[in-house]
Amino acid sequence: MFRLRGSMSDLNIATVTGVIGAITGCVALVLSIKSYLLVRAMKALDLRLELEKAFNHLDMVLSGIDGYLDYVHKSHLAVLAATGRNQSGEMKLFEEDFAKDRTRLRRLLGSQPQRESNYERLAPSELEKLVVAVHAFHAQVADVRGKYQKLFESDEERRKEIRTRHP
């Protein structure tokens, strides 16, 4: 490769440049592989954290949802009774709608994504799918809960009106 016969001037500049380029290329390859693996590990960690966060938010939405819906149900029936609309068509429609929402919620809870103790073995693509599934489930449950939150707020306004009319 190198010819060192008598002086350094016999070295071919092109050979030296080629060797330096080859060494630089090998070092760059090793560093880029190392950087890729580090970025992949960081992405997986970020997705695992996002997944835990999504499950925590889901737990908050689900905590006490049955009791909350029962409370709103009783509250709305009381408001309907106070406004003289118990045993009305409106009450019947509410009861039917409530039964449908209760069934929908039971069906949703049956398909709830399950939390695992460790997500280390999952690839980033699998973690992404799981994060999306948890967020989608959260949105569906929040939709049901939000509907009854609005109903409860409306009932509170009606209660205020009733109180002002009957001090």
Image (spheres, helix red, strand yellow):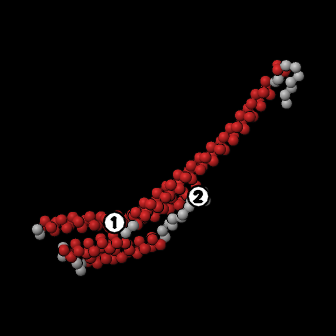
Looking at the image, residue 9 sits to the left or right of residue 86; the answer is right
Looking at the image, residue 51 sits to the left or right of residue 21; the answer is left
For the point 60% across and 49% down, which residue is it?
Answer: 40
Q: Which residue matches tag 1?
A: 147
For the point 71% across and 36% down, which residue is it?
Answer: 25
Q: How many marks?
A: 2
Q: Is residue 48 above or below residue 13?
A: below
Q: Position of residue 70 (x, y in %)?
A: 32, 73
Between 96 and 10, the one lying in front of the other is: 10
Q: Amino acid at mark 1?
A: Lys
Q: Position of residue 31 (x, y in %)?
A: 66, 40
For the point 59% across and 46% down, which residue is it?
Answer: 39
Marking on residue 120: 2
Q: Quadrant of residue 141?
A: bottom left
Q: Quadrant of residue 88?
A: bottom left
Cα–Cα span, label 1 and label 2: 37 Å
Going from N to C along the chain, the mark reached first, 1 or 2, is 2
